[in-house]
Amino acid sequence: MLISWSFLRAFEKCPYQQKLIRIDKVRPKKIDERRFITGSVGHKFFEIWAKRGFDNEMNPAAAGQIFDGLIRRKYIKWRDESDCGRVRERVIKEASLLIEAVRQHGIDKISDSQIECFLLKALPDGRNFVGGIVDLITNNGSWIIELKMSADTKWADADQLIFYGLLLASIQRRYPTKLSFFLPIMPDIKDQLTEIEFTKHNFFNLYDRIKHLISMWDEREFPAIADLNTCHFCDVKEYCPSSPSHVKN
Ligand code: SF4
């Protein structure tokens, strides 16, 4: 089994949801991809630009082309064309903020960076793996930077960086010294590049959570423990007898 950060987070919110998706192979009719489109465009834009060495030719309009490609590939439908146009304008504006923030924080000056690194490590049990794609690893693996195309810090969950730090540490046999979120669309410049505080205890604690997930999975323990908010956004709620909408009916 491959344990990613998003799987760990989703499992801890509701083991039953992950059982429905991963064991019962239940699929929602159609995931609403519009929820993720702006973040996907921002990440792709950043990745392409970083791989070009943060050159001076990258234009925010390229974000519009990335957007067009994604909505074609993912067959995203809009209620009307003006919605599509509004989101397209938004991704172009966000790309221009991203360019500005990269320059202001000197991210373009980092020379030994690895972009969109897929990291994978087998756990000692030999059956399970921990893996993930890290946006930016720099300073010879001692600094991890995670991009968030949001002006809401609720998406900058320190646990995610600890997870990547643990993953990198298990491969390199040393812990990173700096873990940061890069939030280029935050209005205040000082909020755009934020370092999280951590100790070794955070890494041990996260490893315990991974082991707990494996033990529950092996024991086939899948309680439906989500709160109302999680259930509201749950893509498989129609298959769940504990869903608040079922209980209400
Ligand atoms: S509706 Fe709620 S309780 Fe049911 S699977 Fe989804 S998140 Fe879990």
Image (tube, rainbow, N blue to C red):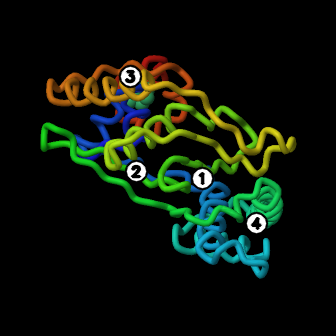
Q: Earlier in the sequence, mark 2 or mark 1?
A: 1
Label 4 or label 3, whichever lies nearer to me, is 3
At mark 1, the secondary structure is loop
Q: Earlier in the sequence, mark 1 or mark 3?
A: 1
Q: Which residue is mark 1?
A: 36
Q: Quadrant of residue 68?
A: bottom right
Q: Which residue is mark 3?
A: 205
Q: Quadrant of residue 48?
A: bottom right
Residue type at mark 2 is: Gly
- Identify the residue at image location x=22%, y=22%: 221
Label 2 or label 1, whichever lies nearer to me, is 2
How packed is label 4: few (under 14 Cα within 10 Å), some, or many (20 or more)? many
How packed is label 1: few (under 14 Cα within 10 Å), some, or many (20 or more)? few
Q: Residue furthest right?
A: 188
Q: Which residue is mark 4?
A: 88
Q: Is residue 132 left or right of residue 65?
A: left
**Distance Cα–Cα, label 3 vs label 2:** 18 Å
182 versus 33 height, above or below = above
The answer to whether residue 86 is seen in the rendering is no
Label 1 or label 3, whichever lies nearer to me, is 3
Label 2 or label 4, whichever lies nearer to me, is 2
Residue type at mark 3 is: Asn
Residue type at mark 4 is: Arg
**Distance Cα–Cα, label 1 vs label 3:** 30 Å
x then y, percent, for residue 152: 72, 37
Residue type at mark 1 is: Phe
Q: Is residue 21 left or right of residue 128?
A: right
**Distance Cα–Cα, label 4 vs label 3:** 41 Å
Q: Which residue is mark 2?
A: 132
Q: Looking at the image, which is closer to me, 8 or 225?
A: 8
224 versus 136 height, above or below = above
